[in-house]
Amino acid sequence: MRMRYLTTAHDMGELAIIKSLCEANDVPCLFQDEHVSSLYPGVLELRCQVMVDESEWERADTLLSRLRLQIRDVTPFA
């Protein structure tokens, strides 16, 4: 199984959401530095990288893009 970089989780909460999304959709995934990043929160170099099976990358990217629209779209107040 060849793994491909999908995204970087910025904190443990975001990682939990991404992990749940992958597991719920049967997307094989690997989390690099999953526990190390929780030891030193806020250290940019220790963020968790999410890797997925290369054959599932496109599907995982689509799922993640739908999630980003829901939780990261912020419109400025007028």
Image (cartoon, rainbow, N blue to C red):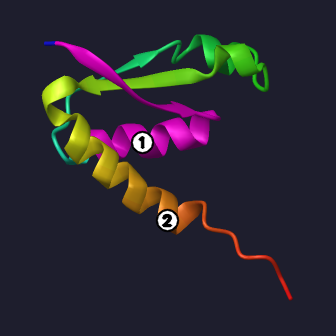
Residue sitting nearer the eye, 38 or 28? 28
Left or right: residue 32 versus residue 43 is left
Q: Is residue 76 magenta?
A: no
User: 28 above or below 34?
Assistant: below
> From which residue to which does the magenta span run?
2-22
Query: On residue 44, which mark appears?
Result: none
User: 24 above or below 78?
Assistant: above
User: 37 above or below 21?
Assistant: above
Q: In the rendered structure, which amino acid carries the disc numbered 2?
A: Leu
Q: Residue at x 74, y 21 (%)?
A: 44
Q: Residue at x 69, y 69 (%)?
A: 74
Residue sitting nearer the eye, 44 or 14? 44
Quarter containing the N terminus: top left
Kindly state the secondary structure of the residue where label 1 is placed.
helix
Q: Residues within 10 Å of mark 2 (few under 14, many from 20)?
A: few
Q: Residue 70: percent from the left, percent from the top? A: 50, 67
Q: Residue 5: percent from the left, percent from the top? A: 38, 24
Q: Is residue 15 magenta?
A: yes
* Residue where numbered disc 1 is placed: 18
Kindly state the secondary structure of the residue where label 2 is placed.
helix
- First reached walking from the N terminus: tag 2 or tag 1: 1
Quarter containing the C terminus: bottom right
Left or right: residue 23 versus residue 13 is left
Q: Residues within 10 Å of mark 1 (few under 14, many from 20)?
A: many
Residue sitting nearer the eye, 63 or 20? 63
* Residue where numbered disc 2 is placed: 69
Q: Residue at x 70, y 14 (%)?
A: 45
> Cα distance, mark 2 to mark 1?
14 Å
Q: Residue 3: percent from the left, percent from the top? A: 26, 17
Quarter of image, res 11:
top right
Q: In the rendered structure, which amino acid carries the disc numbered 1?
A: Ile
Q: Residue 39: percent from the left, percent from the top? A: 70, 14
